[in-house]
Image: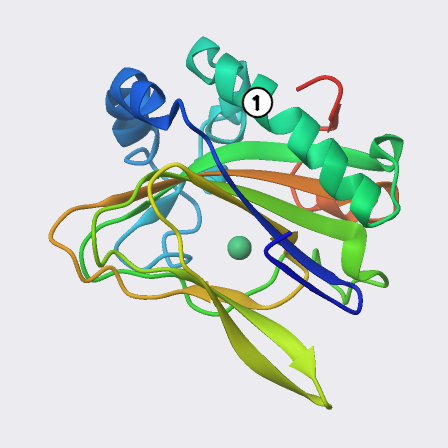
Amino acid sequence: MLYENNNIKIDKIKYNNNKSLLNKVLPKIIDITSRPNTNKNFILGGSCSYFNEDLDQSGKKLFLWKEFRDYIDFIKPHIQNYLNEINKSEDYYYVTGMWANVYPPGTHVAKHKHNYFQESSDLNDILAILLYLRKPNDSGNLIIDIPENNSTVDYKVTMEEGDVVMFQSSLCHQTEINKSCESKFIIGIELVSRFQSDKAQNNNSSIRETLEGL
Ligand SMILES: [Fe+2]
């Protein structure tokens, strides 16, 4: 575990087959992140395929791509370990989606949290698993707000290409500006608790796959 304090846990692991995945999948990732999108302002100048307009919601179903089979097989036991660490069962979670983000030069995502309309009752209700598929030098790291003494402190998670970070995405988080001259690409997976899943459903996040079904 990279960070562990009170109920907050941040895990970082290395996916060793990332280079091969990147070579196979990059043209498709560029395509999926350049389609019409309902939430253009989420990453100013960039895009998150989770919000693609396609009626089949293909932008949040990257787990169906055969190119991701090896990554999913790799990451599933790590997700299960993380859930064990926070004393939760995978039966308690749904996967709302698996998507791609693109951050062209000069872009970043502002501070936000994944909270489906209202404050989460439990820090562990919403989890994010992010693979840094393509991470040019100086393209920016992840900053997570850690509550401390009635305030918060910025915790920087330094990410390299092929790194995967798991954290409670009900915590506020943001990314540093991409100061390189190339685009950064990230693959996200989100888990929500059964408690949160009804709100996720109402939020047009209609995918309700279990972790087992990934
Ligand atoms: Fe996020």
Residue 191 location, quadrant: top right
For this orientation, the residue located farthest to the left is 181
Q: Residue at x 63, y 41 (%)?
A: 190
Residue 182 seen by the camera: yes
Q: Is residue 123 above or below residue 137?
A: below
> Looking at the image, which residue is at 27% across and 25% down?
26
How is the structure coloured here?
A: rainbow
Residue in view at x 21 percent, y 45 percent: 183
User: Dividing the image into 4 quarters, which one contains the C terminus?
Assistant: top right
On the question of residue 56 being in view, the answer is no
- Rendered view: 135 above or below 100: below
Front-most of residues 202 and 157: 157
Task: Note whether 42 is above or below 25 in the view shown.
Answer: below
Q: Dot 1: few (<14), some (14–19), or many (≥20) neighbours within 10 Å?
A: some
Q: Residue furthest bottom?
A: 150
Judge from the rendering whether residue 130 lies leftward or rightward of residue 44; answer left or right: right
- Of the residues shown, which amino acid type is indicated by label 1? Phe
**Residue 185: where, in percent of width, then height?**
32, 41
Count of numbered labels shown in the rendering: 1
Is residue 48 shown above or below 121? above
Q: Residue furthest top?
A: 66
State the image coordinates of residue 77 (x, y, percent, origin top left): 69, 27
Q: Which residue bears the numbered disc 1?
A: 74
Percent from the top left, x then y, of residue 157? Answer: 47, 61
Residue at the (72%, 51%) spot, across then down: 126
Q: Is residue 7 left or right of residue 140?
A: right
